[in-house]
Each structure stands twice: as C-alpha cells, then as structure tokens.
Image (tube, helix red, strand yellow):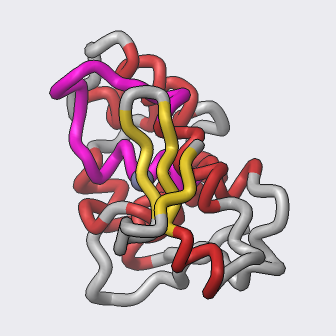
Amino acid sequence: MKIDTAYNGVAYAHNGKITISSEWLRKKPEDIDVITHEVMHIVQSYPHKSGPGWLTEGIADYVRHVYGVDNKRAGWSLTGYSADNHYTQSYRITARFLLWITQKYDKTLVLKLDKHLREKTYHEELWEKYTGKSLEDLWKEYQSAPQLS
Ligand SMILES: [Zn+2]
C-alpha cells in the first residue's frame, strides 16, 4: 500500500498494490474502509473482460457495506434509492441493488457472481438462473419497491 502525495484521485488498486491519495487521507482520516473497497479489488483480480465494470465496483462497495470496519464514522453508507438510479451506475447504487437481491432472492448471489467473474463464466442469464428473474425484471421490481429489510 502506497500513500501518494502526487495522486489527485481517492484511491485505486493495481497489480496487487493499493495507492491512496495523501490529500484524501488528510481530508477524511476516518475513511478506513476506502481500503476495504480497494483490498476487495485485489481479492477480485478478475481476468480481463470477465464482466461489466459496474458489477466489479458494485461488489467492492457491497463488500465495504458488509465487511467495513467503521463505515459509520466515515459517514459512508449505501446511497438511498432514487428514481434516476440505474444499476449500471456502479459503486453504492449497484451495491444497494445487490443487497436488495440478496435479501429478497438469494443470500449468496454476490458470492456466486464473484465466482463466475473470477472464472470468466459470467453472463447475464445468471441473474435469472439464481433468482428466477432477469436482470431487467429484477431492476424493475427494485424500482417499484426498493426498501431494504
Ligand atoms: Zn473500485
């Protein structure tokens, strides 16, 4: 893990290493779980073109939500649903949708999707295989009743 004084973004993972902006840490010293998100990218290390980028980012934020050490102190939580959301918007928007599906249809869906992405066997029909509903139908249902339990 490297703290970079020249990097203007927040953080990124690449080739098994995490880079975090020193400026970000100065501004948000309580944001420990930015590391949880980035470490998940190292855990993921999906092969090239194994699946959509929004899903990779959504899973990383889902993991931050589930396994984060202190999201509360960082003021980080899953974004509430809003009508202009779409699951392809990545990060917390996708993570919240994933959480909703795990609560409603399949507790282990994220684990299964992760395995498929890892093995380069992800395809869109998997959503239907595991939930009985297509990705688009899941999204429509989520839009009409996005409450989490
Ligand atoms: Zn990320």
Q: Is residue 52 left or right of residue 40?
A: left
Q: Residue furthest top?
A: 119
> For the stretch drawn in magenta, what is the main secondary structure?
helix
Tell me which residue sits at (55%, 48%) in the image: 2
What is the tally of numbered marks visible in this picture?
A: 0
Tell me which residue sits at (57%, 28%) in the image: 111
Q: Relative to 61, does residue 141 appear above or below in the rendering?
A: below
Name the residue nearer the viewer: 84 or 77.
Answer: 77
Q: Look at the image and tell me in which quarter the N terminus lies.
A: top right
| Position of residue 114 measured from the top left corner of the image (x, y, whole percent) | 46, 27
Q: Look at the image and tell me in which quarter the C terminus lies.
A: bottom right
Q: Can residue 96 be seen by looking at this rendering?
A: yes
Name the residue nearer the viewer: 104 or 61.
Answer: 61
Is residue 92 one of those drawn in magenta?
A: no
Q: Relative to 42, does residue 22 appear above or below in the rendering?
A: below
Q: Residue furthest front?
A: 5
| Position of residue 49 measured from the top left corner of the image (x, y, whole percent) | 16, 27
| Position of residue 85 measured from the top left corner of the image (x, y, whole percent) | 31, 79
Is residue 59 one of those drawn in magenta?
A: yes
Q: Is residue 46 left or right of residue 48?
A: right
Tell me which residue sits at (54%, 34%) in the image: 109
- Residues shaded magenta: 42-62
| Position of residue 38 measured from the top left corner of the image (x, y, whole percent) | 53, 47
Q: Can residue 97 be seen by looking at this rendering?
A: no
Tell me which residue sits at (63%, 74%) in the image: 25
Q: Is residue 83 left or right of residue 81?
A: left
